[in-house]
Amino acid sequence: MDAVYLTSDIIIHYFLSPLEPESHELDEASQQLYEAAKERSERAAATIDKVNKGELRAYISDLVLFETVKAFEAVPFEKPEEEPDPEDPLALRRGTVGFASRKNPHIGLALRSLVVQPNILGIDKTLWDRIFVLYAYDDAVLSIETAYHTAKVQRIQWTEGREIEGIVSFDEAYDHIKDITRIDPASFQ
């Protein structure tokens, strides 16, 4: 195989492996569910590892990244004792409990490390790198949607040299982003 298209479930299972059950005395149905989740995680890891090693090219879409972030936000978060190693953010994927906090840099680091892989295709890597920087590190707590729109506006201004007066939105999070002006829709009445 030369190239494949990855859906969000592969990326989610890659980063979020199931936790080992606390008790080895699970009922049969729970044990089967755990084993199935563990197998999916192992298969997803094998797939992404081939991409990381340059053995497989994989297309993803913006929607895949949105779905992945939303899935991470839904997972209970247990703050790790150590900050992630920026040199090797993928080392944290196994055994991580979750990524629910937007101020937790693990989401941005993990997905940034994936999208910059040379064998990941189909997305604007420069744009997504900026989105994940805004999402994980901006002083304002931004949703992935707000980070996306902010990065798009900045890109239009920086790379196309076009002037944008502001972002028309009810979302007051834009009020806290440096160099972005939110325009209240009431301004147009």
Image: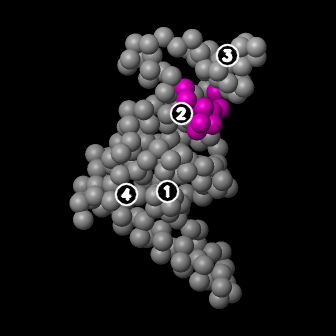
Residue 13 position in % (x across, y down): 50, 63
Asked whether residue 108 appears in the rendered view, the answer is yes
Image mark count: 4
- Does the magenta portion include 144? yes
The amino acid type, in three-letter code, at marker 1 is Ser
Where does label 3 land, which residue? Answer: 183
Disc 4 to disc 3, C-alpha distance: 38 Å
Disc 4 to disc 2, C-alpha distance: 22 Å
Frontmost of labels 4 and 2 is 4
**In this rendering, would 38 be left or right of 1?**
right
Where does label 2 land, which residue? Answer: 148
Residue farthest to the bottom, as pictured: 28
Q: Which mark is residue 8?
A: 1
Q: Secondary structure at mark 2?
A: helix
The amino acid type, in three-letter code, at marker 4 is Tyr
Main secondary structure found in the magenta portion: helix
Question: Which range of residues does the magenta coloring cover?
Answer: 140-150
Pointer 1 local density, CA inside 10 Å: few below 14, some 14–19, many at least 20: some
Dot placed on the residue nearer the N-terminal end, 4 or 2: 4
Marks 3 and 2 in Cβ contact (< 8 Å): no
**In this rendering, would 3 be left or right of 141?**
left
Q: Secondary structure at mark 4?
A: strand
Frontmost of labels 1 and 3 is 3
Marks 4 and 2 in Cβ contact (< 8 Å): no
Dot placed on the residue nearer the N-terminal end, 3 or 2: 2
Where does label 4 land, which residue? Answer: 5
- Does the magenta portion include 174? no
